[in-house]
Amino acid sequence: MNPGSVNMLRTILELGTIAIVCGVLINIVWHSVRSGMTPTPSSSKAVRAVEKLLMAHHKSGGVIDPGSGWGTLLFALAKAHPDISFTGYEISLFPFLWSRLRCRWLGLANCRIIRQDVFTVPFKREDTLVCYLSPELMAKLRDKLMKEDCDGLLVITNTFGIRRQTPIAEIRLKDAFNTRVYAYRFDPNPAIFQSNRRRHNQ
Ligand SMILES: C[S@@+](CC[C@H](N)C(=O)[O-])C[C@H]1O[C@@H](n2cnc3c(N)ncnc32)[C@H](O)[C@@H]1O
């Protein structure tokens, strides 16, 4: 091959790589804007706190990550607890593909990743949710739990709590943001909510 052809081939490869990287980034940004949340992974301190709360309060049933991102939280929990079944729902294409591959590489038989909008998945009261979602998505999740038969469902959430619900436990992380991780037993009729509704109706 003459030097001109080699240079041409190199340019094509470089442009192809740049196009693929840009395509992946644009897809991630597009999904983040649509879903209202970037695929930011939980910190290692937050993962440890979620695990501590899970061990203290989980009784039976499967554990769901409603927005599992790159799988950081889900895989750490699934590796540590092979006796529990874990399911991650992820809407964004590349975090989903990456975490599916990682799940296979890690050989985690107790873990599966599904590409689906989690708001279309029915929950059961035996499920446990481990979340790291935006305040808007936590509000949407709360509305969903209200509509379904989820009395007593355990929700462990990194950073953002559930409005009008009282946590049964809380861990404050020693990090730059004083992050909190909360555990709730979902109550569809919290006293504070009822008194607010009464006031609203008067
Ligand atoms: C902050 S990341 C959390 C990642 C992971 N749970 C962790 O703690 O490491 C939130 C993820 O939720 C996903 N997400 C947002 N809305 C969703 C929906 N309706 N259904 C499924 N996934 C969703 C986003 O794509 C993003 O990857």
Image (cartoon, rainbow, N blue to C red):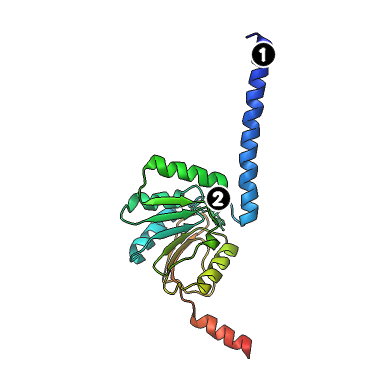
Residues packed near mark 1 inside 10 Å, few (<14), some (14 to 19) or many (20 plus) = few
Q: Amino acid at mark 1?
A: Ser
Identify which residue is drawn at 54% across, 62% down.
120
Mark 1 beta carbon near ligand 1 (under 8 Å): no
Name the outermost residue toward the bottom. Answer: 202
Q: For residue 39, which numbered disc appears in the image?
A: 2
Image coordinates of residue 136 in percent, x first then y, are: 60, 64
Residue 138 location, quadrant: bottom right
Image coordinates of residue 194 in percent, x first then y, are: 53, 84
Image coordinates of residue 197 in percent, x first then y, are: 58, 84
Assign a secondary structure to mark 1.
helix
The quadrant in which the C terminus is found is bottom right
| In the displayed structure image, the side of residue 109 where residue 37 appears, left or right | right
> Do we see residue 43 in this rendering?
no
> Do we see residue 55 in this rendering?
yes
Question: First in sequence: mark 1 or mark 2?
Answer: 1
Q: Amino acid at mark 2?
A: Pro
> Separation of disc 1 and disc 2 at Cα?
41 Å
Assign a secondary structure to mark 2.
loop
Name the outermost residue toward the top. Answer: 2
- Tell me the residue that label 1 is attached to: 5
| In the displayed structure image, the side of residue 125 where residue 144 appears, left or right | right
Q: Relative to 103, does residue 68 appear above or below in the rendering?
A: below
**In the image shown, does 110 or 50 lie closer to the viewer?**
110
**In the image shown, does 162 or 92 lie closer to the viewer?**
92
Mark 2 beta carbon near ligand 1 (under 8 Å): yes
Name the outermost residue toward the left. Answer: 83
